[in-house]
């Protein structure tokens, strides 16, 4: 029995030697500033322990926060029992901080105890706070050039204010700070949008002397309400894209549109350029570009880069996605069909030498020639652009049709009249009719876009062939 007691006491001693002993002393920690302090302007927050503790565990148990932000700390010991902390980035005057210590502390003797304390305070001298003295109140039915202002009791930096200020919905604005650096005015860079409720906010604004504003500021303003939807008043032909162009508002597209004439769009209100541009479409498509034709933003042009196709029906559509600068959309979609007023180029008359050919569709046309030569005069319904003259004459040919034993004609002359609508062609080396052989030649005028073309989008609709029997 005696041996058993000795072994039990020895076992208890070894267990105590291998474990930390919970301290039942009245160990505690207090903070400076204490839990009831509202303001604090010291260099460090201090945690004072009632006994000496191991520094590592104490330093791992402290925290400094402001809102949801936690700060990196500079830590030092004023003595064996006092831990001092401060934010590495420095204190911001006027900001609310929360400092806390929460954890298990280890005495030098090896005993442990739980320590907890928390203190919340606003940093700085309460007699030197940074406040807003005056600001514009929330307003309704504001003009599109409306501005609002703030007046502070301390000087501020324009750059800092810009970083702390925000407005929704997003819009370009400008900020002006007066000479005192205490009054700030916010105004639109262009104009506020009508029919819009704007909300603004100022967060964490600091003064030049590093005081943080006592509270975040927020407010709203409502711009004027516009209920009137824009109307597309007219789609009309326009002479050209110049500032002096004539807008034929009394004419429909079908009545006047030709060549590469622009199409004009006239709206009842100032429109948003991009939305109007994106709302207009053509079927079939027309290569061209879109532009604003006035300063007010009510007139727009679509300028084609190619000629309108002859005889083709187009449909122009303006969808109701076109909106004015107040963000109001066109009441309804507008469609208008049109066909170019240009007509196909016509062959008005044909003359062989001094003889008018009354009906060149009769085949063959019998014509008496002299010296195996012929002069052919062709009159067109439209003038030919100068740069197209060689191309047109090259699209006309006189060739041997039958028999192959006859001679092929040789072109000897090409000339145009002053108005460039009459072409004279001279040919020689023709074979005339004999007692045993009749020769036929074919005069061919090439039609289609790649054929005889005035250069203004007008062309001969189809090939014209005139068979000639020279005598």
Image (cartoon, rainbow, N blue to C red):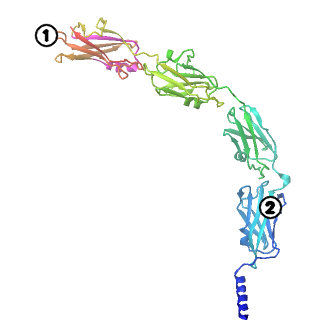
Name the residue: 74% across, 50% down. Answer: 204
* Residue named by callout 1: 436
Location of residue 324 (image quadrant): top right
Task: Spot the residue most to the right.
Answer: 127
Decide which of tag 1 and tag 2 comes sooner along the chain: 2
Q: Which mark is residue 319?
A: none
The part of the chain drawn in magenta is: 372-397
Quadrant of the image occupied by residue 360: top left
Whether residues under marks 1 and 2 lie with C-beta atoms below 8 angstroms apart, the answer is no
| Image coordinates for residue 309, horizontal then vertical, percent | 43, 22
Question: How far across and how far down the image is residue 470, in percent?
Answer: 22, 9
Secondary structure of the residue carrying tag 1 is loop
- Would residue 203 be found to the left or right of residue 272 on screen? right
Q: Tag 2, which secondary structure?
A: strand
**Cα gap from disc 1 to disc 2, whole angstroms:** 131 Å
Residue at left offset 84%, top offset 55%: 125
**Residue placed under numbered mark 2 in the picture:** 119
Up-down relation of residue 325 to residue 40 (above or below): above
Q: Specify whether residue 403 is painted magenta.
A: no
Q: Is residue 430 visible?
A: no
């Amino acid at each position: 029995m005696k041996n058993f007691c000795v072994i039990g006491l020895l076992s208890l001693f070894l267990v105590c030697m291998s474990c930390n002993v919970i301290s039942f002393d009245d160990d505690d920690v207090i903070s400076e500033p204490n839990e009831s302090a509202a303001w604090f302007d010291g260099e460090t927050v201090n945690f004072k322990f009632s006994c000496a503790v191991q520094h590592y565990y104490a330093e791992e148990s402290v925290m400094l926060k402001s809102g949801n932000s936690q700060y990196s700390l500079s830590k030092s010991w004023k003595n064996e029992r006092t831990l001092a902390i401060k934010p590495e980035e420095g204190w911001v005057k006027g900001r609310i901080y929360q400092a806390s210590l929460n954890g298990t502390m280890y005495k030098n003797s090896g005993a442990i105890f739980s320590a907890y304390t928390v203190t919340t305070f606003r940093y700085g001298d309460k007699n030197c706070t940074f406040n807003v003295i005056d600001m514009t109140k929330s307003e309704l039915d504001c003009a599109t050039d409306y501005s609002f202002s703030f007046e502070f009791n301390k000087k501020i930096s324009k750059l800092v204010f810009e970083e702390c200020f925000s407005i929704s919905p997003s819009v370009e604005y400008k900020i002006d700070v007066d000479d005192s650096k205490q009054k700030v005015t916010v105004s639109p860079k262009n104009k506020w949008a009508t029919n819009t409720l704007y909300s603004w906010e100022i967060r964490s604004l600091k003064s030049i002397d590093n005081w943080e504003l006592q509270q975040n500021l927020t407010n709203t303003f409502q711009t004027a309400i516009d209920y009137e939807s824009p109307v597309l008043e007219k789609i009309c032909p326009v002479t050209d894209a110049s500032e002096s162009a004539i807008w034929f508002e009394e004419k429909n597209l079908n009545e006047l549109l030709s060549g590469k004439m622009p199409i004009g769009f006239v709206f009842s209100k100032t429109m948003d350029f991009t939305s109007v541009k994106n709302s207009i479409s053509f079927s079939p498509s027309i290569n061209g570009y879109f532009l604003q034709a006035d300063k007010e933003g009510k007139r727009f042009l679509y300028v084609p880069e190619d000629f309108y196709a002859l005889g083709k029906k187009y449909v122009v559509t303006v969808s109701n996605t076109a909106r004015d600068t107040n963000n109001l959309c066109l009441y309804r979609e507008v469609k208008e069909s049109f066909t170019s007023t240009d007509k196909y180029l016509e062959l008005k008359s044909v003359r062989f030498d001094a003889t008018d050919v009354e009906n060149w569709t009769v085949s063959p046309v019998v014509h008496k020639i002299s010296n195996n030569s012929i002069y052919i005069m062709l009159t067109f319904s439209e003038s030919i652009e100068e740069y197209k003259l060689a191309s047109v004459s090259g699209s006309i040919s006189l060739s041997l049709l039958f028999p192959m034993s006859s001679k092929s004609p040789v072109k000897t002359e090409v000339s145009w009249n002053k108005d460039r609508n009459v072409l004279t062609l001279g040919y020689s080396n023709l074979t005339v009719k004999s007692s045993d052989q009749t020769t036929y030649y074919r005069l061919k005028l090439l039609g289609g876009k790649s054929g005889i073309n005035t250069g203004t989008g007008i062309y001969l609709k189809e090939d014209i062939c005139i068979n000639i029997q020279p005598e």
